[in-house]
Image (tube, rainbow, N blue to C red):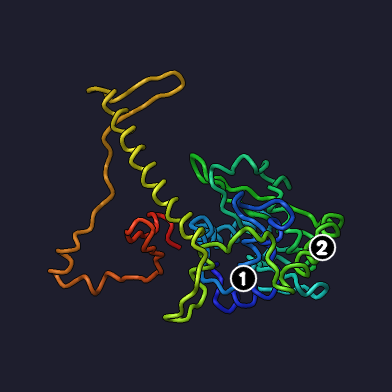
Amino acid sequence: MALTDRQRELRRGHLGASLSPTLLGHPPVPSLTASQVYYRIVEPLGDDATEAMRLGDWLEIPLCQWIGERIGKAVTRRNAFRVSGEEPILSATIDAFVDDESHGECKYVGRHNAADWGPDGSDQIPASVMIQVQHQMFVLGTRRCYVAAAIAGYQLDRRLYVVERHERLIAAMLPRLVAWWNAHVVPRIPPGDDEPPPLDVLACRERVPGKSMVLAAPLVRRYQQLGYALDALGELRERTKAELIAALGDAEIGEAVGYSITYKSQKSSPRVDHARLRADGLWETYCSQGEHRVLRISGGKGESQTEPKGTQP
């Protein structure tokens, strides 16, 4: 279940179970860093859920029901936020309660990560999930976690993992998590001085209308030059694409050592006729327009440059 604004605010004052794996060297996503975790704790941030996370939320209801069917116990699905009584900086958001001794955690697993999950009925789950559920068990005081995973493939494969509380692992985790919190969150010292806040954090940062700041010209120039380089690479890629298609002649399929190339027709994405929607008086009813900040630079080559496509926060 998606977090409420209140739960997001509460989580900012604590180290949640989903954040611990990254701080212990096992990020659930390879690109996630300790610096990004830090900024998500200390700065307000809106809904940062990915599509995979939203799909996981959508699957929680049937997965929780399935846990109950498999183990023969009542399972209460509840998006509950809890704080540890022993170590108050640690918190956990729980998908489901099973009984006084156990709880449930639901996961959607993309097909690219399916190989990281062991057979049904085992406790062979990725290290990031193991750390997360051990963190949850410490916060809740439970002895067992049932992890229900919906694993994508040719069909959706349901597997149930039974993970017991591991006291030695918890004892190894806690000092490192508390030390990281005291070293960075309490004094507001980001880990990794060279890494800026993520773009989604910067996009949510409140700004003073009309306020101006003096910036270092080399930084501005570097960003601008990277934009020119991306444009040049885009043009080179398009030219190379044209050369590749031309080399096919009138064929749909090409073969090269180690490669197979196809150039076949496929259905395009549906298009919306904006003019007709306006003419029929439906535009205002069914269409909405959001708002976001755009970085623009004037100068350098006497031009106004907008950030390259795909970089908007």
| Secondary structure type for disc 1 | strand
Nearer to me, 18 or 159: 18
Location of mark 2 (residue):
174
Q: Where in the figure is residue 246, as x and y percent of width and height?
A: 26, 26
Nearer to me, 85 or 296: 296
Q: Residue at x 72, y 52 (%)?
A: 25
Q: Where in the figure is residue 29, as x and y percent of width and height?
A: 60, 51
Circle 2 crowding by C-alpha within 10 Å: few under 14, some 14–19, many from 20:
some
From the image, which quarter does the N terminus lie in? bottom right
- Circles 2 and 1 in contact, beta carbons < 8 Å: no
The relative height of residue 187 versus residue 56 in the rendered view (above or below) is below
Amino acid type of the residue tagged 2 in the rendering: Leu
Where is residue 248, by image quadrant?
top left
One can see residue 155 in this view: yes
Furthest-top residue in this view: 257
Describe residue 117's horizontal placement relative to residue 183 as left or right. left
Location of mark 1 (residue):
78
From the image, which quarter does the C terminus lie in? bottom left
The relative height of residue 310 versus residue 138 in the rendered view (above or below) is above
| Secondary structure type for disc 2 | helix
Describe residue 146's horizontal placement relative to residue 58 as left or right. right
Q: What is the spatial separation of the Cα atoms under label 2 and label 1, in whole angstroms?
A: 26 Å
Of mark 2 and mark 1, the one earlier in the sequence is: 1
Q: Residue at x 52, y 64 (%)?
A: 216
Describe residue 193's horizontal placement relative to residue 254 as left or right. right
The relative height of residue 301 versus residue 206 in the rendered view (above or below) is above
Amino acid type of the residue tagged 1 in the rendering: Arg
Q: Residue at x 68, y 42 (%)?
A: 118
Q: Where in the figure is residue 214, as x and y percent of width and height?
A: 50, 72
The relative height of residue 26 versus residue 54 in the rendered view (above or below) is above
Nearer to me, 226 or 234: 226
